Image (tube, helix red, strand yellow):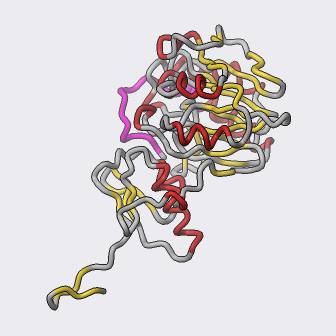
Amino acid sequence: MSEVMGAELPTPAWHIDGRCTNCDVARQLAPGLIGEADGRSVILREPQGPDETGQLYAAAHACPTRAVRPPTGQLEADRDPFPLALDDTVRLCGHNSRHTAGANSYLLRRPDGTTMMVDTPRWSPALAARHEALGPVTDVLLTHRDHAAHGRRYADRFGARLWIHEGDLDAAPDADRVLRGTDPTVISDGVIAFPLPGHTRGSVLYLADERYCFSGDSFYWSRTTADIEVVDSVTWYSIEALADSLTRTVDRLRFEWLLPGHGDRRKLPGDEMARRMRELASRTRRLRPRPVDFSAVRW
């Protein structure tokens, strides 16, 4: 504690200010340190040791509204961990954007040393340079319309191809490659696009190397239920269409990493993921349309 004019002042601490939009990004990166109360994220306790401090700095640098604040009140550039390696192939971009509702984005490294970007972080020339430093970026893969905000700027900077499905083409009308229909499309060796109308008309998931599933907002890992879930309370197009999409696609999906736009990530053995996906398809067929309600998402 410090004293001023005989009065004790509280020691500065980590805090989350009123700009929080309850997007869940910070809670994904600092579980146990950041929780939810009254419809927003809150600091549960101060970090203990460098690893937990690093988790809070990751949450702060990813937060789309910069609502997560360190004791100094200033984010230190040298404490920015992004793009953050999830394994030797995928990196989490961080620096989530307010213009994509705080969606997560990823870098997918290919065997030839090139990289693909799945959805995008906030636009910044400095961030683009950081991503380019990892290798040439050949493609920017958009999962759906809600995440299209910065796609063209990143694609132009990288000299990359911008992809989107025809169902959401009005969100990126100058896309270089347009996915059509519901049949899978090969993007490159080992990377396949599976149209999955439901969350939006043009939702797509991208499957890489039978290890990684970039699911956009079609489904995610819920910490609340400890299972894969659909966001039925925020389905803009049709929950029935999403059920049909899952039924049509689920037996063709093989992966270990679930990497969504919103909601948590998870790695499990392929057989277990396949079982959980079949169960998800069955549960989704029993769902019915409901009013949009962001507060009902079971993060």
Nearest to the observer: residue 124 or residue 273:
124
Q: How many marks?
A: 0
The span shown in magenta is: 283-298
- Check the picture and name the quadrant holding the N terminus: bottom left
Picture quadrant of residue 294: top left
Does residue 107 lie above or below 249 as drawn?
below
Is residue 142 visible from the viewing direction of this image? no
Side of 287 relative to 228 (left or right): left
The overriding secondary structure of the stretch rendered in magenta is loop
| Residue 292 falls within the magenta-colored stretch | yes
Spot the residue most to the left.
Answer: 5
Residue drawn at (49%, 72%) of the image: 47
Say which residue appears at 67% left-offset and 12% top-offset. Answer: 182
Q: Position of residue 194 (x, y in %)?
A: 69, 21
* Residue 117 image position (x, y, % from top left): 65, 32
> Is residue 15 located in the magenta-colored stretch of the structure?
no
Residue 52 visible in the shown view: yes
Q: In terms of image quadrants, where is residue 81? A: bottom right
Front residue of this view, candidates 279 and 15? 15
Residue furthest to the bottom in view is: 6
Q: Position of residue 76 (x, y in %)?
A: 47, 61
Image point 76% across, 43% down: which residue?
Answer: 89
- Expressed as whole percent of the image width and height from the top left, the position of residue 4 reads 19, 85
> Residue 124 vs residue 159: left or right?
left
Q: Up-down: is 15 above or below 242?
A: below
Q: Which residue is painted at 75% across and 37% down in the image? A: 274
257 and 60: which one is in front?
A: 60
